[in-house]
Image (cartoon, coloured by chain):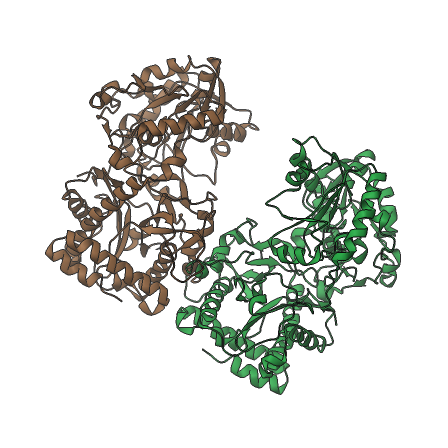
Chain colours: A green, B brown
Amino acid sequence: MFQNFDVTSSPEQAAPRVTALRVAMADAGLDAFIVPRADAHQGEYVAPCDDRLAWLTGFTGSAGFCVVARNAAAMFTDGRYTVQVRAQCDPDIFDYVDWPATSLGTWIAKRDAEIIGFDPWLHTEQDIIALRTALEASGKTVVATSNVIDKIWTDRPARPNAPVISLPIELTGRSSEDKFAMMIETLKAAGADTVVFTLPDSLSWLLNIRGADVAHNPVVQAFAMLNVDGKMHLFDEVSKYDSLGPDPRITIAPRSEFQTYLKTLEGTVLIDPASAPYALRSLIEDAGATIVTGEDPCIMPKACKTEAEIAGSRAAHLRDGAAMVEFLAWLDAQDPRSQSEISAATALEGFRAATNQLKDISFETISGSGPNGAIVHYRVNTATDRPLSESEILLIDSGGQYVDGTTDITRTVSLGHPRAEERASFTAVLQGMIAISTARFPRGVAGAHLDALARAPLWRMGRDYDHGTGHGVGAYLSVHEGPQRISRASLLALQEGMILSNEPGYYKAGAYGIRIENLIVVREAGEISGSDARDMLEFETLTFVPIDRDMINADELAPWERDWLDGYHAQVWDAISPRVSDVAREWLQQATAAL
Amino acid sequence: MFQNFDVTSSPEQAAPRVTALRVAMADAGLDAFIVPRADAHQGEYVAPCDDRLAWLTGFTGSAGFCVVARNAAAMFTDGRYTVQVRAQCDPDIFDYVDWPATSLGTWIAKRDAEIIGFDPWLHTEQDIIALRTALEASGKTVVATSNVIDKIWTDRPARPNAPVISLPIELTGRSSEDKFAMMIETLKAAGADTVVFTLPDSLSWLLNIRGADVAHNPVVQAFAMLNVDGKMHLFDEVSKYDSLGPDPRITIAPRSEFQTYLKTLEGTVLIDPASAPYALRSLIEDAGATIVTGEDPCIMPKACKTEAEIAGSRAAHLRDGAAMVEFLAWLDAQDPRSQSEISAATALEGFRAATNQLKDISFETISGSGPNGAIVHYRVNTATDRPLSESEILLIDSGGQYVDGTTDITRTVSLGHPRAEERASFTAVLQGMIAISTARFPRGVAGAHLDALARAPLWRMGRDYDHGTGHGVGAYLSVHEGPQRISRASLLALQEGMILSNEPGYYKAGAYGIRIENLIVVREAGEISGSDARDMLEFETLTFVPIDRDMINADELAPWERDWLDGYHAQVWDAISPRVSDVAREWLQQATAAL
């Protein structure tokens, strides 16, 4: 079982640890210390040894930070974690700060703290520039220092050292040698001699390797430098790479030597200020090298999947779709009151595991019934678990990591008697989801231009959802991958091979939540017979799982929306029916019947 | 009759004039001279005395420029004018250059011309910076000079001196005194002592005046400076203002004294580099004053109409809608073959004139039948006029200037037997137009975010249109007004009171053109009963004229699209039926019946 539902929060741990931290801060001459969630790789997940924020505060959310001053401390979290932070962090120790509405600068300005320390490996240059700008007026000093947490965290876990595996060309579609050649071209164009890689999914993509350093995302956490001569120096637990065999291009050294090696750099060095640790600049400049800044050159080619990666994703989605259908058929056969949010999530992981190809779930399943469905980032645990009920709907958002692809799917299902309002909301969400699924658009169109297509049906009802419409997804990599997005903020033109989620939703606080999510991939648009069709792009749907017909007001749909849904369900039947049990097939036939 | 349909092009005039220009260029020590369409006010229309481009080349389009070198000359025009420039400009004299694909820099680099002159009053600072950058490599020199055309244009018309009228507070909703106060606040915020106004619609808005200096747009062409002390110096034909009576705030001097006065400026002067003539900077800096650059401070408040201006626009649209309905009823009663594009445009202007309140048409009516409808900026003349036919459709795009508002409406009508393909295209265009009409959206949403709603139905057919979805419209002012737009390029958040056009289209070259256009105004969204509706904005439709039901495939429409159309037609009947003749009312009843 990859997911566990224990209550991990332990507010009582904070008191002694914060006290110890204040002693250590005083020894280090600091009035305050910033504890971010991030590690040096700025990923969504951190290894246990890097989870300083949870260790200190009890807060287990994936975004937020803590500041401890001499006589005050605060937890900064955004709207997603308003509830969770109160459940997990002791109010006698921490102010709850609504961030970014209230900035660190605003909070600390009023506190007795002149010298504020931070670990330069855990913050990007952009972060620290913003922080110093915010504190300029207050006259306070922000200083890079060694990590004070690490001095008091005596039983800190060891760094992960799970073995690294190598992906075959059949799955990646592009050899690591070819990727090196691409990078060298980029370096030459940027006039750089060396590029420093600190993003795990960039390095994993570049070397066609995967690992198990963090939960749910098979990235390898390492630092590396690639020189324009084609040689790479990689810094990590050396033993992780034993199974790979020798690679003349790459020298692997212990992670501890990265800092030392940085000091030997010469010439011009490319770093990405959006992700590179703040510590890099001074180390590189002290070495006498010149820094050029630019986007990590792996990011764009990684985002545009190869035909092999897209074929792999199709295969993974058929496998995952069959598991989802087994789950939905099983759920439909249960007395709702005999099940709960946890038992549903457990059963679903079981069906995925039964494929014998599940490497991990791609994130902790969101299983929210009734009012819990309205909590966008809900993670059920034994304290919040609710029994299911035929009078409530269930939102279940989950995914699998398979060696050939990463999946991410949300379905919202009736458990018996959905209310008219729930059906009306579901229908509007479905219309938005269909608008993206059927979108055909000229090259140059960005996520910012398409986002409204998914919202317009809800907007007409005066409703909306407070998250993006779609995020990028990796190829057996991070389930949240940049830079591609469907969001009003994303002006990056969508390009062939980009995999995105398509997940509009509607959340009525205290009542219910609805989200429908498929993964889609950007393709050159197909021919339209007898039309003066222009050269355009379109989305191919990767996910094949029925959408609950009991939740749809069919008479609200436009003819073309109904055609899409019936056609989609026919595709689901053709693709999935040969892959499921007889019981599930019988259920699937009903579930995929035309409206 | 405000529109005439004569063939104004006279290619033969160019030869002697270009020859004379080259002599004058030589006397001035110039190898080449740039002749833009623009005057010093950078508007869409120019007065006859400023129409140097047409005088020299015969080209009467509203965008483009000419460059005359010693041994070569070129007309630079964009895709809209590919056909027109060939009809109007002598190929023995002018190269036809597809601009901006080919830049002036590219063309002139290969020509025997080292010193290139331009009139610093006819180009903005931004234009010249771009030009100099483009020519940097070539080593050519771009020099500001007095206008060489004006030396050889002996029978040049006099400057317009039509009297200026003053608009009452009932129409503007905001006194010029209040607007001065707003400007003074802006000046203080910008740390400027003086602002220079050169945009006619800004000055006309600020002073609540209108004029007749150019065709179709009632702007007053003048220069003015407003000081933070509340005093304005205005430079124009003084006699134009006789009817206004004295205004202690304003000193009016002859236009010829503007340049002299600029040389007396002190302190800090605000100019808008996007519109201010290049000449201003050196004159102001020579005077010892300091320049700060920023957007013309009239632009945003002018774009957000007052309640009085919106009420006026509603009244103007009812009046204009009644005239349109009389026209459409009349057209429907004619044998198509007895009419032509010109007779249709003439009849329509007649119905508008019959309101006895038409000040001008707001632009030259686009009346295009069959293939002419596919020419987006088509202007019919006696040479291109086509008889109407029951087997073709007619696109007619027109508008009126009334003292209480500016209208702009396009209808595409069947003249008997529309083809299935024309109906399918019309239905998709209508669906896009309905998507914008019904859009409800959160504050912060920009035209860039809504544009795709209008295109998605066409995109699904592999089709598109090569113009924006909507432009801003003034209040008895320019029919094309910035900055508000519905376009992928416009990231400016839409704000209450902005009036825009909503005009998707589809154009099949050589076959037919379709466009449906209403004007809409941004309003706070109304209540939705029983909904957890968010605070949003929506569009109120200002235009009330039937949309041709014979062109619609009703079974393609979504239920909510059909509801909008039937509801719109019911509103049209209620609003217009009391205002038209019995004959027109009878026609209107059929035209507004539910689908």
Q: Is residue B567 positioned above or below B13 on the image?
A: below
- Examine the rendering and report whether any part of residue B339 can be seen: no
- Examine the rendering and report whether any part of residue B202 can be seen: yes
Which quadrant would residue B54 be assigned to in this image? top left
Image coordinates of residue B221 in percent, x first then y, are 31, 27
* Quadrant location, the C terminus of chain B: bottom left
Q: Which residue occupies the foreground of this view, A186 or A197?
A: A197
Left or right of A128? Residue B372 is left
Q: Which residue occupies the foreground of this view, A35 or A552?
A: A35
Residue plotted at (70% across, 62% down) = A173
Residue plotted at (49% across, 80% down) = A593
For this orientation, the residue located farthest to the left is B582
Image coordinates of residue B26 in percent, x first then y, are 41, 17
For this orientation, the residue located farthest to the front is A92
Left or right of B249? Residue A139 is right
Marker count (numbered): 0
Q: Which residue occupies the foreground of this view, B22 or A517?
A: A517
Left or right of B227? Residue B330 is left
Left or right of B276? Residue A472 is right
Which quadrant would residue A520 be assigned to in this image? bottom right
Image coordinates of residue A26 in percent, x first then y, are 83, 39
Q: Is residue B184 positioned above or below B299 on the image?
A: above
Residue plotted at (38% across, 54% down) = B436
Q: Which residue occupies the foreground of this view, B411 or B184?
A: B184
Image coordinates of residue B34 in percent, x first then y, are 41, 27
* Quadrant location, the N terminus of chain B: top left
